[in-house]
Amino acid sequence: MAGPLLDTLKGMNLDRRPIWMMRQAGRYLPEYRALRAEKGGFLALVYDSEAAAEITMQPLRRFGFDGAILFSDILIVPYAMGQDLQFLAGEGPRLSPRLADHALKALEAVPQRLSPIYRTVERVRAQLGPEQTMLGFAGAPWTVATYMVNGEGSRDQHETRAMAYCDPQGFQAIIDAIVDVTSDYLVGQIKAGAEAVQIFDSWAGSLAPDEFGRWVIAPTARIVSAVRQRCPGVPIIGFPKGAGEKLVSYAKETLVDAVGVDETVDIAWAARELPENMPLQGNLDPLRLLAGGPELESRVRFILDACAHRPHVFNLGHGIGQFTPIEHVEALLAAVRGWQRP
């Protein structure tokens, strides 16, 4: 047995539901806050492979999650493509030069910026138990492009959507470049020890159906094909946040092995409508975890019961909030571990 998480991602419907949480290595943990205060800013931690491995392991030591998710960031890819990357306190990430103002071809790639991430994967994999799974990840091309074009996050991705409409050929070139680097990056993580990988498309929900097909499904399918050709048998999780009913076409056309479901989707609907026996992942609202109380346990049971007939990885609908109490995470784990198939 490879471990419940990896077995589930490969299609086994286990009584013991595996659990990990997006952003499980991070600011809600006091041990993380202490290490960050000692070491410095976020990017400094990501590029200190020893520190990044320690952060990745912290939630596993405290809670015993079934998967370790690499401590890094989706913007490492544009950083390796030649944009400058900074994380400003209280303001979030900044990339420069913005591709809204500068041509992609003006960037000078720095592929060695990916090497410390691979070393982190190696360090973590060496520390994991035999039933724990090492998860790598990358941002999906659409979401990464929104940051590259705008230089920072935005609520509606206005600049990027406008570029895609006004200059589809130029925007396609950006997407193509991200596809190539991301494919190599995920393969590099797998060669370093990642046993499964997730593709985060955090801003997929901002696109209309036609654009979703062109800028979310098609590039993701190319990455899945490239990674699968070079690393056959390694599960790939797709997470198009905000996709809603478009999850069905995403699952069928990208050919990912498993689909992450965000908290805005009815998990019972997803369990009925997505391809039979495809593993689902999700979808507890992170704010429900923050709130805690009796509703937390009842919602956990609802999610687990809705997915009882198919492979399911318990997770949040997005990343855990930084102010989430530790005892709420402990209550979540107890509810998942104590669940019995109806």
Image (spheres, helix red, strand yellow):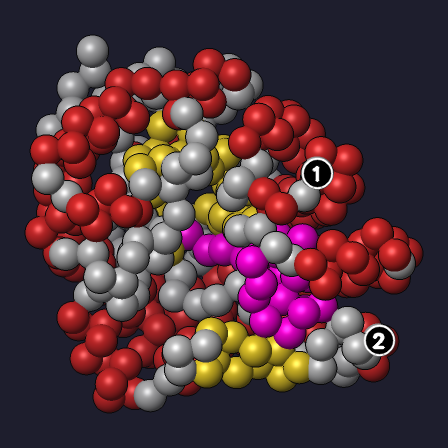
Q: Nearer the viewer, residue 89 or 117?
A: 89
Q: Nearer the viewer, residue 118 or 90?
A: 90
Vertical placement of residue 273 versus 297, above or below: above
Query: Can the viewer see residue 91?
Result: yes
Q: What residue lies at 21% left-to-right and 50% top-to-bottom?
A: 290
Query: Can the viewer see residue 234?
Result: no
Name the spot of residue 190 as percent of width and height, x first.
52, 55
Q: What residue lies at 67% left-to-right and 53% top-to-bottom?
A: 142
Range of residues picked out in magenta: 134-155
Contact between labelled residues 1 and 2, with CB atoms less than 8 Å apart: no
Disc 2 or 1, which lies upstream in sequence?
Answer: 2
- Pointer 2 residue: 103
Report the quarter where the C terminus lies: top left
Mark 2, Cα crowd under 10 Å, few <14 / some 14-19 / many 20+, is: few
Q: Nearer the viewer, residue 340 or 169?
A: 169
- Pointer 1 residue: 208
Q: What residue lies at 53% left-to-right and 51% top-to-bottom?
A: 202
Vertical placement of residue 15 versus 221, above or below: above
**Count of numbered tags:** 2
Name the spot of residue 81 as percent of width and height, x first.
69, 74
Is residue 304 found left or right of 199 in the rendered image? left
Type of amino acid at the residue the image marks with label 1:
Ala
What kind of element bears circle 1? loop
